[in-house]
Amino acid sequence: MILTVTLNPALDKVIILEKLKQGKLNRVSKTSILAGGKGINVSEVLTKLKIKNKALAIIGGDNGKKIASILTNNRIDSDLIWSKFETRQNLKIKERKTNQETEINEKGKVSRKDIDDFKFAFNKAITKNKIVVLSGSLPNKVDKNIYAELIDKAKEKDTKVILDSSGKEFKLALKKAPYLVKPNLEEIENLLGKKIKNNQDLKKGAEYLLAQGVNIVMISLGAEGAFIASAAEAYRISTPQVKISQTTVGAGDTMVGGIAAQIDKAQNLKATGKFATALATAFVQSGSINKIDKALIEKMENMIQIEKIY
């Protein structure tokens, strides 16, 4: 079973219009309300893949009630810590004409008691889960060391940790050597302090992370695919160019869901990278995890090109 952690969930409002006209009236052609937060997104993917999982999250207020309702309607198993603070709301604006996406994200807030209640629930949950996904941003004023602390607790129970975060919390958590990390291109460039220009640069970036004690590194490269590596082998995965159906927001979480599913099934490195990348590409083309089926995933897998780097 897989546990996903979302310390800073959000109610995501996605609006679609032809073109955003700044400072002027804009007419919306379509609006969607989604339960957001990276861990919740991963649980949605795992549920679609019929992989047993539980979403552990802190929510509150009317937005929290809406998230809880969405999770129930989507049959996502969850353990929700209720806060007195309203869960944040994020706005995603997609322009049909240019495929440009604009995100406006609130920060989020929780209390010390919320975090204490969360830690209690986490410590109980990891005894029943062999994989934990720690992903996403932290609410305002939460200790940046919290992911590092959770990794320590998980490793005490021999639980594999997948980390998908950024900034200071990622750097602190990295010191605890999670099982797998999934930085994107911008995050790996920020970590290394240099631009990634080719496969050798990707190899060096992966080697840097592996040297910290990480077992597997998967670097997501957006439309260019991904790079996956362990100490023993590495692969550059190139994806077909697909038309963005609705949004690319959530593609990274879809990839993490694919990774977690493959680790849960004890698949090898190459198969894990291929499946996770195909799943993320299918998400971009279809516009929703609910529109993805086995045939579409297989189609994407057949179109993917893989180059062994070492």
Image (tube, rainbow, N blue to C red):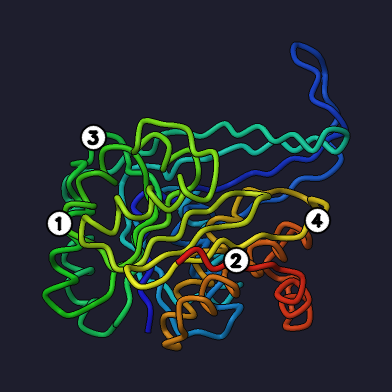
Nearer the N terminus, badge 2 or badge 1? 1
Question: Which quadrant is the N terminus positioned in?
Answer: bottom left
Q: Left or right: where does residue 94 sit relative to residue 280?
A: right
Q: Are there few (<14), some (14-19), or many (20+) residues within 10 Å of tag 1?
A: some
Residue 109 placement: quadrant: top left
Name the amino acid type tagged 2: Glu
Nearer the N terminus, badge 2 or badge 4? 4
- Checking the image for residue 149, the label placed there is 1
Q: Left or right: where does residue 68 sit relative to residue 254?
A: left
Disc 3 target residue: 141
Residue 31 in view: yes
Nearer the N terminus, badge 3 or badge 2? 3
Residue 161 place in picture, x, y as percent: 29, 68
Q: Closer to the observer: label 2 or label 1?
A: 2
Disc 2 target residue: 307
Q: CA distance from mark 2 to mark 1?
A: 36 Å
Q: Closer to the observer: label 3 or label 2?
A: 2
Residue 299 place in picture, x, y as percent: 78, 76
Give the residue drawn at x 48%, y 80%.
262
Q: Are there few (<14), some (14-19), or many (20+) residues within 10 Å of tag 4?
A: few
Residue 116 in view: no
Nearer the N terminus, badge 4 or badge 1? 1
Q: CA distance from mark 3 to mark 2?
A: 43 Å
8 to 26, vertically: above or below:
below
Q: CA distance from mark 2 to mark 4?
A: 20 Å
Q: CA distance from mark 3 to mark 4?
A: 40 Å
- Residue reaching furthest to the bottom: 265
Disc 4 target residue: 242
Between 40 and 274, the one nearer to me in the picture: 274
Could you tell me which secondary element the residue under label 4 belongs to?
Answer: loop
Name the amino acid type tagged 3: Lys
173 to 107, vertically: above or below:
below
